[in-house]
Image: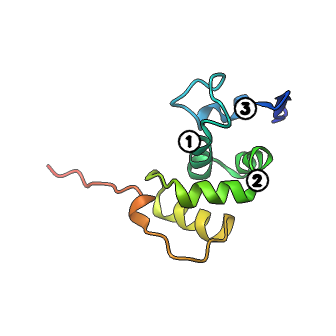
Amino acid sequence: MKNNIKIKSKEIILPEKLKAILWSKNIKAINPETDKVYIIHQVLSYGDISEIKLLLKIYSLKEIKDIFLNFPKKIYTKPVFLFVKNYLLKINKELDEKYYVKSFSKCVK
């Protein structure tokens, strides 16, 4: 099964492969332009390398970096946040982790 991104006169149809990552919305109803903050963060946080490659076919690296920096989402684990920030996006400046890294509260009986 190929992960081709279909383009209909400037309209991008997301591949079904991303359905598991974009679970909170209907994959056929997602608009790659108006939902790009959601799409980019979900794929960066939960996607594998092949899904990140798909993301780079839909959006430019500059656009992904811009969304990551200007529209933070608190959905990342610390290791994933550091991987995305330091290796995927090569962001050298300090970012406040409280806007990106989700916290896990301990269950106490």
First in sequence, mark 1 or 2: give its number.
Answer: 1
First in sequence, mark 1 or 3: give its number.
Answer: 3
Q: Is residue 92 left or right of residue 1?
A: left
First in sequence, mark 3 or 2: give its number.
Answer: 3
Using the image, determine if residue 57 lies above or below residue 31: below
Q: Which residue is mark 1?
A: 38
Q: Is residue 37 left or right of residue 103?
A: right
- Expressed as whole percent of the image width and height from the top left, the position of residue 54 reads 76, 45
Determine the residue positioned at 47% across, 51% down. Answer: 73
Using the image, determine if residue 80 lies above or below residue 94: above
Q: Which residue is mark 2?
A: 60
Please rate how many residues cluster around mark 2, counting C-alpha atoms within 10 Å: few if below 14, some from 14 to 19, many from 20. Answer: few
Please give the label number shown on residue 80: none
Q: What amino acid does circle 1 point to?
A: Tyr
- Expressed as whole percent of the image width and height from the top left, the position of residue 67 reads 60, 54
Q: Secondary structure at mark 3?
A: loop
